[in-house]
Amino acid sequence: MRLSELGKQQTASVVGVEKLQADDAIAARLQDIGFVAGETVKVITRAPWGGDPILVQVGTSRFALRREEASRIVLQQGVQRG
């Protein structure tokens, strides 16, 4: 599943970030701020009227992501680091 599909207040583990090209700056930035394999992510809330942007927490940091950016983060539910 994708981060853009995760429900409000739900958590999942990051599997990876989809790269659209070899030197994908957005994918690199998402990984730099903590969206790396095995990290737990939680959707805190979504903006009204379409849910864009999405406020997410990864580790102890919170970020507002556009839905398009969130759709590039691949997740697995049910497996989380302790």
Image (spheres, grey):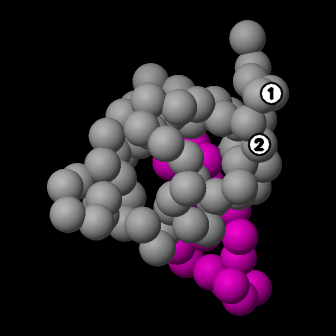
Quick check: can you spot residue 44? yes
Q: Is residue 41 above or below residue 6?
A: above
Q: Amino acid at mark 1?
A: Val
Where does residue 59 sit, x and y in percent of width and height? 53, 27
Residue that badge 2 annotates: 76
Q: Quadrant of the C terminus?
A: top right
Res. 45 image quadrant: top left
Q: Amino acid at mark 2?
A: Gln
Q: Residue at x 52, y 73 (%)?
A: 26
Residue that badge 1 annotates: 79
Find the residue positioned furthest to the left.
48
Find the residue positioned furthest to the bottom.
21
Any magenta on residue 5?
Answer: no
Specify the segment rendered in magenta: 17-35
Circle 2 — which element?
strand
Any magenta on residue 29?
Answer: yes
Find out whether the residues at labels 2 and 1 contact each other: C-beta distance under 8 Å.
Answer: yes
> Which sits in the foreground, 43 or 65?
43
